[in-house]
Image (tube, rainbow, N blue to C red):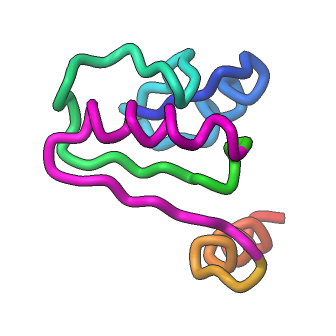
Amino acid sequence: SACEPSPALREQARHRAPQGVEIEAAAPDWLPFDDNSFDWVLLRADELPPAALPAALGEACRVAACGLVITFWNSASLPWLAWRLHGRRHA
C-alpha cells in the first residue's frame, strides 16, 4: 500500500504503480491502518513540511511491525539518481 492525500497525485500513482499496489487516500500524519499492519514502512521525509515530521514519524512507527526506513531525496541521493535514470529511459 501507499498513501497520497492529493487526488490528482493519487491518480497518477495508480497508473504508475505495479499491479496489486493500493494507493490510499491518507495523509502521513494520520494513517488509516491498524497498529502493526505492515512489516516495514518507507517514509520519504523530504516531502513533508518540518512541522508534520513528528506526527508522520509517530504514525509510521505505529503501523510498522518490524521497522521504519526514512529516505531523503536530493541530487546526491541514490534514490533520486535511480528515479532520474528510470525516468530518462522512458522519456
**Which of the 4 quarters of the picture holds residue 64?**
top left
Q: What residue is drawn where x is 64% and y is 80%? A: 77
Q: Residue at x 68, y 38 (%)?
A: 51
Q: Quadrant of the N terminus?
A: top left
Q: Residue furthest bottom?
A: 76
Against 64, is 67 above or below? below
84 vs 55, left or right, is right
Q: Is residue 38 above or below residue 35?
A: below
Q: Position of residue 40 (x, y in %)?
A: 26, 49
Query: Which residue: 52% across, 40% down?
Result: 54
* Residue 46 forms part of the magenta stretch: no
In the image, the segment drawn in magenta is 50-74
The part of the image, by quadrant, that contains residue 74 is bottom right
The one of 71 and 23 positioned closer to us in this rendering: 71
Residue 19 percent location from the top left of the image: 42, 36
Q: Position of residue 42 (x, y in %)?
A: 41, 51
